[in-house]
Amino acid sequence: MALKKSQRSLRTWSKQKWRTASGKKSSETGEVYAPEEQIKRLKSTPKGRRKLAAANRKKRAATRKGKQFAKHGLHKGKSKRNR
């Protein structure tokens, strides 16, 4: 039986290696989780490093406010329903 598009997308998403930029737990560092390939791509350019630093600042601020989720902008343009 063939998988639906949403099921294929979920399978691809779950196979990615997700981590923080430092490789440590987010609870220790306050960093955002992102796919390893995306982190490498962001760390390779000055603009990407600034974007990653801004996302980490937003994540830490949201955590201080007691929020579970932070709108940090790394996944901008991708809706939660249609990924």
Image (cartoon, rainbow, N blue to C red):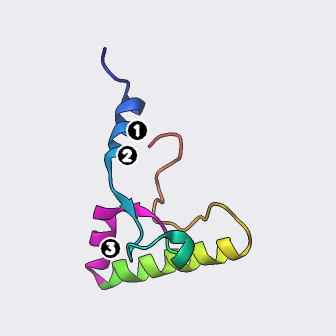
Residue linked to disc 1: 10
Going by the numbered disc 3, the residue's amino acid type is Leu
Is residue 70 shown left or right of residue 14? right
The answer to which of marks 3 and 2 sits earlier in the sequence is 2
| CA distance for labels 3 and 1 | 23 Å
Q: Quadrant of the C terminus?
A: top left
Going by the numbered disc 2, the residue's amino acid type is Trp
Q: Residue at the spot x=38%, y=74% of the render?
A: 21
Numbered mark located on residue 13 in the image:
2
> Would you identify the image quadrant in which residue 38 lies?
bottom left
Task: Name the front one of labels 3 and 1.
Answer: 1
Q: Are the two marked residues, 2 and 1, in contact with CB atoms closer than 8 angstroms?
A: yes
The span picked out in magenta is 32-45
Of residues 56 and 15, the one nearer the viewer is 15
Q: Where residue 27 appears, x then y in whole percent?
A: 56, 71
Q: Give SS at disc 1.
A: helix
Residue linked to disc 3: 42
Q: Tell me if residue 35 is in the magenta stretch.
A: yes
Q: Tell me if residue 52 is in the magenta stretch.
A: no
Q: Residue at the spot x=28%, y=71% of the render?
A: 40
Q: Give SS at disc 3.
A: helix
Going by the numbered disc 1, the residue's amino acid type is Leu
